[in-house]
Image (cartoon, grey):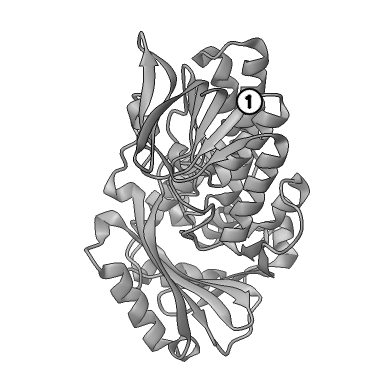
Amino acid sequence: MKYDVVVVGGGPAGSVTARFAAEAGAKVLIVDRRPEIGIPVLCGEGISQRIDGWGMLEGTDWIASKMDGAKIFSPDDTLVTLSKEMAGNETGYVVYRDRFDKELARQAGKAGAKLLLRTEAVGLKKKGGKITGVEVRQDNDSFCIDADIVVAADGVESQIGKWAGIKTTLKPSDLETCFQYTLSNVDYESDYCEFYLGKNRAPGGYIWSFPKGNGMFNVGIGILASLSTPGLPKKLIDQFIQKHPIYKNGTPVRVLSGAVPVAKPIETVVDNLLLVGDSARHSDPITGGGLTTSLEGGKIAGEIIGQAVDKQQFNKEILQPYETGWKKTFGQKLLRNYLVKEIMLDFDDKTLNMLADSLKNYKFEEFSTLSLVKALVLKHPTLLMKLKPLMKLSEKKGK
């Protein structure tokens, strides 16, 4: 078996990379260890409406509901609202993640990419120190797939990146452990995503509620691994649900647990190999959301791969424009939000309550981190020194 490109992982980043590489003329194979694309769902299922203009998805059956903004509750339940009037296209959808992933995989197949399910990568094939493909296991069979380029789209654990010599190990302080219920029969109408902060509620993270329509809600929690203990995420989200009559009588129809990187992005390119999506740490360090950047980064990766295949050159220098591209597109935002995460870890609940109280009636310029930082500095000049590096980075990016 010989392909120009083997993509390990059929999630959003892998499928989009495969699609754009195939559209550029590359012979592409996706391998995924699961028996079905999109299952199990390991996601809060929120994404920005900016994807509407990207033309990567067709139809609307993957959309569960459309959000008008976000409501943020401080530890004492002071409310800060970010509405669609200020958000523009930064409002979002709550999606059916299984349908979403299948649609992206369908688009990759339509472009010419092939897909092997129940196929697990167990190693990299090398010759003279050069990566020449992947070793896989399918049922009871083991075999090699030759490829000029290997794409690591294998998620937060990223064994492919590790086998290539890239440091993919996450510190506990850069990993969120998560637990989520999908609840039905919730008697509550909402067009807003809701976020609940507080060290007692969710140490180093937050609780979320995403409405999916018809009384369905994703209600989950993320806790920084360095502040968590076994079973703590479930314990805390159960306590939250019991204290909120809205959710208390809901019927759980799905339970999920997993982990999300909230780290700085890492090296993503070596000779004959690149990393995309969660394996590249392309999730937002504040929210843990990674769908939007997976699509953006996957498109850049696929296009650069197409150029490499056309030139029949696959070294790091040829693939480097992928890293340059994602850094230009969303890299500064990820770094900026990592700094926000680190700063917020020093805030106790009393400080969060104070900040929320000062912003509860504030008219934000726009729905952005920079707008939030400017508001905090205006209200609390003593924060200027702590937030100064963030301000410089945000102004350099221009948003």
Quadrant assignment, res 297: top right
Residue at 69 percent across and 34 percent down: it is 112
- Is residue 248 positioned above or below 25 on the image? below
Residue at 66 percent across and 36 percent down: it is 19
Residue position for label 1: 27
Q: Is residue 54 left or right of residue 358?
A: right
Q: Is residue 159 left or right of residue 86?
A: left
Question: Regarding mark 1 in the picture, which secondary structure is present there?
Answer: loop
The residue lying furthest to the left in this view is 229
Q: Amino acid at mark 1?
A: Lys
* Rendered location of residue 198, percent (x, y): 37, 70
Quadrant assignment, res 311: top right
* Rendered location of residue 361, percent (x, y): 61, 74
Residue at 57 percent across and 14 percent down: it is 318
Residue 196 visible, this angle: no
* Rendered location of residue 204, percent (x, y): 35, 60
- Is residue 252 positioned above or below 386 on the image? below
Mark 1: few/some/many CA within 10 Å (<14, 14-19, 20+): many
For the residue pair 90 and 151, the one nearer the viewer reads as 151
Q: Is residue 182 left or right of residue 141?
A: right
